[in-house]
Image: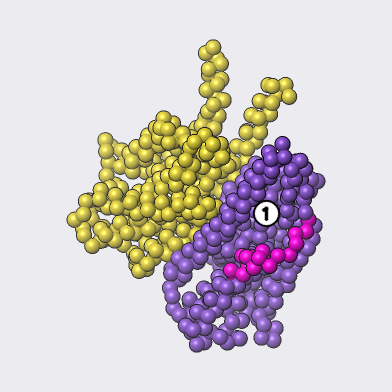
Amino acid sequence: MAKQVIQADGTRIIENERAFSWKRFMFQWEWMLVLMLIIVNIINISSSSNYANFDNIMNAMRDFLDKAIVVFPMALVIVLGEIDISVASIMALSSVTMGMAYQAGVPMGLAIVIGLLVGTLCGFINGIILVKFPELSSMIVTLATQIIFRGIASILLETGSVGGFPDWFNSFGWGKVGSIPIILIFTIIEALFFVYLLHFTKFGRRTYAMGNSVMVSKFSGIKTNKIKLIIFTMAGLLAAVAAVFLASKMGSVRPDVAKGYELDIIAMVVLGGVASSGGKGKILGCILSILVIGFLRYGLGLVNVTSQVIMIIVGTLLIVAVAITNLKSSFGQAKWVKNLSNNIKGVKAQR
Amino acid sequence: MNNSTLKKFFSDNVREISLILVIIVISIFVQLRSGGNFFTPENIADLFTETAILAILAVGMMMVIITAGIDLSIGAIMALAGMIGTTILKGNQEINPVLIILISIVIGTLCGMINGALVSKLRILPIIATLGMMNVFRGLTYLVSKGSWVLQNDMSRAFLNVATGKVFGINNLVVMALVVYVIGYIFLNFIRTGRKIYAVGNSEESAQVSGIKTERILWLVYTIMGAIAGFAGILYVCKFGAAQGETAVGYEMNVIAASVLGGVSIAGGTGRVQGVLLGALLLGLLNNAMPLINISAFWQEAIRGLIILLSVMSNSLIQRNVEMKALRRRNI
């Protein structure tokens, strides 16, 4: 994040590297999430004696990580200033096509590949529509494709379901390497990949730039269409990966699988401090928010809080989190305005 | 002179005229395919009754979308208002149905005020704020109902008659929808506050500079949406004779689709009441017609999605064309 200093004669100096400041380091949203995570865990430990146990925590993670797989690409979509409501429908469609391919006699390995390809294609379709029609908002496009993808899934499978997958496939979702679930290992690798992609590559910097202003990025020579297309396709692909894990955990596929997941996924991204207006946010925040929401749900479930109350709590948490970040940024804005007005005063004084 | 006014009328109402054409074409097609089952008095009455609630909601959603916002919580508000209204009714069968409807409207208004405060005062992006509140309202609905349903037997005759009764041979719901549209039309076209909604949608900053209290307008819009959702919620429950936690899940998507079909731009600032009415009618027509020509229920969802997608895409193509023409006219 480059800082702009407007000098008295009107020229702007853009500092690439800001000096390290303890104050800024401590006032990060991620600390808030760490605090929330600690509070959630303290509450969980004190309310249930079974909680603080390595195996239980691993099992809890296996429960909520299928959504986490889609959180990272969704974070990129939101950093871009867009949104993808269709991810849950892509999960449904790709798992249904995978199941049907298997049912038709395709070997399981190939069926998985077909499912992944279908998911990628869905994401690509979203991307290509948005690239060809830049004036359409991604919300309305993915809203329509959400209905279409799930509609195709229910045309294919009607009200039926496909199950009876081979044993190795079923053990894949529940499976562990040592005592660590496979899905956790996958998510960690994915998270590291996305940290690298968003924070250490040109691609990531360009994504931030596009989130701030597509127009400016375009004029700066960024291939905005290509980046948009890649990110939406990636969201489709990873939704399909999540669908594979989900199908393996459930042992069967249905067209209404993962209904409403998109809202949970968006909630996790936004709670992670990714500004929904685009251009801001870190993968680390998303990782923390996945853990906060996941453990909160798990802990509340352990002490028999009904799912309805959990809904209310998660909804409130989302709003409070966003409200706090908003207050912080409006404070920053006020400061920025003050600096600017001081500069103007300085110019007048010189004259 | 006459020719040019006609031309102006067409260019001003491209969206409405093309919607009417699409509706006519689909109607004729369905009439032919279904062997004359479409244009029967019963079916047409059915079509309007089915569409009434969707159409009522679309007016509110239009105002929200005009301010470049969105409200995802209306399905949940409908469920909450309907549930509280009928739960009260269950305890006291003697209560006048009008009072029940008023109570639901008040509940909806309160929910809408919360949404509005979050969007206008705390500056939370509408999609996020209403997404969060959707969870909260839906959760509250379950808490109020304690997981049980309020069924037709628990509702008084007088209340159920609201949805089935008729005024001059027209179903009450259709009459209510018409009243809402007339009020909406007058409010958005001739009342100062209504015009301010468009101003805020076009550019919030310019509106603020011109002295419009934008925060208040935003708050108002979400409150109206809430009130309408409460009203529609109790009608929905009354019509289907059951209130439950899952009432109207995902209904917001239908309403948004109707508004967008009616030419309301998600970017804000544009949208007209007459367009939205036609958009809602088109969506209702599709729902009504697809079973008539034996399209299986499994196909209906995908077809509906495709139609929404094609309509927004063709809309933006028309828009581009118009802009190109405007540029050419100025020899640029």
Chain in purple (letter) = A
Chain at tag 1: A
Name the one closer to the observer, B103 or B16. B103
A231 vs B174, left or right, is: right
Q: Is residue A153 above or below residue A343?
A: below
Q: Residue at x 65, y 46 (%)?
A: A342
Q: Residue at x 54, y 12 (%)?
A: B1
Seen in the picture, residue B309 relative to B181 is either above or below; the reply is below
Q: Which residues are magenta?
A: A16-33
Which amino acid is tagged 1?
Gly
Q: Is residue A97 above or below residue B70?
A: below
Task: Locate the C terminus of chain B and report the quarter of the image it occupies.
Answer: top right
Q: Is residue B271 visible?
A: no
Colour basis: by chain
Give A321 or A113, whichever is nearer the viewer.
A321
Q: Position of residue A283 (x, y in %)?
A: 68, 65
Image point 52% across, 22% down: which residue? B9
Q: Is residue B191 above or below residue B304?
A: above
The one of B317 and B196 positioned closer to us in this rendering: B196
Was residue A343 drawn as part of the magenta stretch in this picture?
A: no
Neighbor class of circle 1 (other Cα within 10 Å; few <14, some 14-19, many 20+) is many
Tell me the element at label 1: loop
> What residue is disc 1 on?
A279
Percent x, y of residue A215: 72, 43
Chain depicted in yellow: B
Q: Is residue B145 visible?
A: yes
